[in-house]
Amino acid sequence: MTRFILVACLLAGLCISNTYAQRAVGSLPPVLSADSISVDIVKRSYDQPLIVIRFLGSLCSHCMQQLVTLNEKALTFTDLNTRIIAFSNNPPSKCAEVMHDYHIDTSVIDICSDTDNACSRALGTTIAEKDGSTTDLHAFLILDKGQVVLEYYSATPLMSFASVIDVLKRIRR
């Protein structure tokens, strides 16, 4: 019973976790682009502000809706000099298929593969439970010059982007 209460409190906290304080992201394992090229997320954040999304894969309809909504705002992200890297444990070939099928604007959004969940574990979104099960969470972060300037972890994907756009306007280069 105690474990249930602790898990419920943790999930409740994660559902509303929306942090604006800056902290160094540290290092993250690379993800693979749809072309199977290694992508260093932290290094890319030094080039321009970067939205990093951990989603649960192409079978998650809510995740796909999040990506479609972000894709519809591609011009806004271009104006804010911001790129998006979204990753899941789908293989690179599936990432390419999603980008094609959903008409993703690849000048703004890269859908990448983290097949071994190494990057997800480093972010704390793939959690190995004591009973051997795994808990998977969605994540939405804004990185700028290796610093996390916004982070959101939840059982559901972030779908409201007004605060995200406000943060990006504040860090606009």
Image (cartoon, helix red, strand yellow):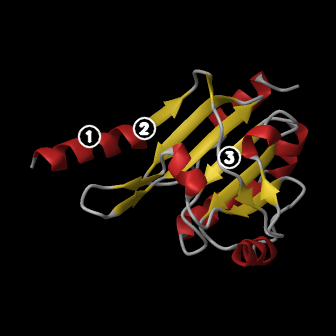
Mark sitting earlier along the chain (3/2) = 2
Residue type at numbered disc 2: Ile
Cα distance in 3D space between marks 3 and 2: 18 Å
Tell me the number on the disc at residue 16: 2
Q: Regarding mark 3 in the picture, which secondary structure is present there?
A: strand
Crowdedness of circle 3 by 10 Å Cα count: few (<14), some, many (20+)?
many
Mark sitting earlier along the chain (3/1) = 1
Residue type at numbered disc 1: Cys
Q: Position of residue 142 (x, y in %)?
A: 68, 36
Residue designated by label 1: 9
Residue designated by label 3: 52
| Image-based side of 53 in relation to 138, left or right | right
Image quadrant assignment for residue 89:
bottom right
Residue drawn 88% across and 38% down?
81
User: How many marks overall?
Assistant: 3
Cα distance in 3D space between marks 3 and 1: 25 Å
Q: Which of 103 and 47 is in front in this view?
A: 47
Q: Nearer the viewer, residue 116 or 99?
A: 116
Image quadrant assignment for residue 76:
top right
Q: Regarding mark 2 in the picture, which secondary structure is present there?
A: loop
Q: Where is residue 172 in the image (x, y as percent from the top left)?
A: 83, 26
Residue type at numbered disc 3: Val
| Image-based side of 158 in relation to 34, left or right | left
